[in-house]
Image (spheres, helix red, strand yellow):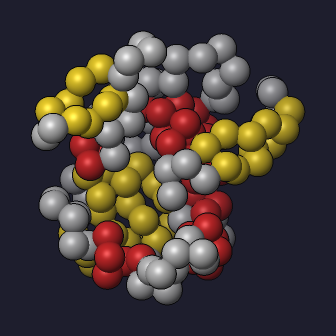
Amino acid sequence: LLSHDLRVESLSMGARTYTVGELIEMILGRYMFEDGLPSQDAVRALAKIGLRLGRGDDLVDDKGGADVVFIHKKSPHIEKILEKTPYAKSYVDVMSQAKGVRKSDKVVRFDGTSSRVLAVPLKNLSLGEDVTNGRTEPARDE
């Protein structure tokens, strides 16, 4: 899911393609390249497919200390992204088996829809880091 390419249109930067992981890094202020979008454009792009950032059970769509990704439980966009995998229709069940992931009763507004969510800790995503032998180390090219 993090490596999926999304085409994003921005008033300030035109149309560009980024991975889902890069868009999350932009919102968190961790994207290290010059072609980054304003965070509100990244927030909008992720909301369209069924992803929002939060802290605990609250939405935080900026660098304000996000520690979870809220994932829409029935997003047709996520199902399409995962369609060539064996868990496209059951991604919520598969993801909920990971450490720290929880099914939430919180209803979150996405782009045009609302849904209950799966809360995935950001630390599970290893953005901007290499995870080897159970240790977290800076990425080699940073």
Which residue is depicted at the point 15% across and 38% down?
A: 133
Q: Position of residue 44 (x, y in %)?
A: 63, 49
Q: Position of residue 116 (x, y in %)?
A: 39, 77
Which residue is depicted at the point 32% across and 76% down?
A: 94
Q: Position of residue 72 (x, y in %)?
A: 46, 71
Which residue is depicted at the point 47% across and 33% down?
A: 25
Q: Position of residue 51 (x, y in %)?
A: 49, 59
- Residue 103 appears in which quarter of the rendering? bottom left
Q: How many marks?
A: 0
Left or right: 38, with 24 as reference point: right
Relative vertical location of residue 29 with respect to residue 61 in this rendering, above or below: above
List the single residue furthest toward the front: 133
Instruction: Return the residue nearer the eye: 132 or 2.
Output: 132
- Res 116 seen here: no
List the single residue furthest toward the bottom: 89
- Res 37 seen here: yes
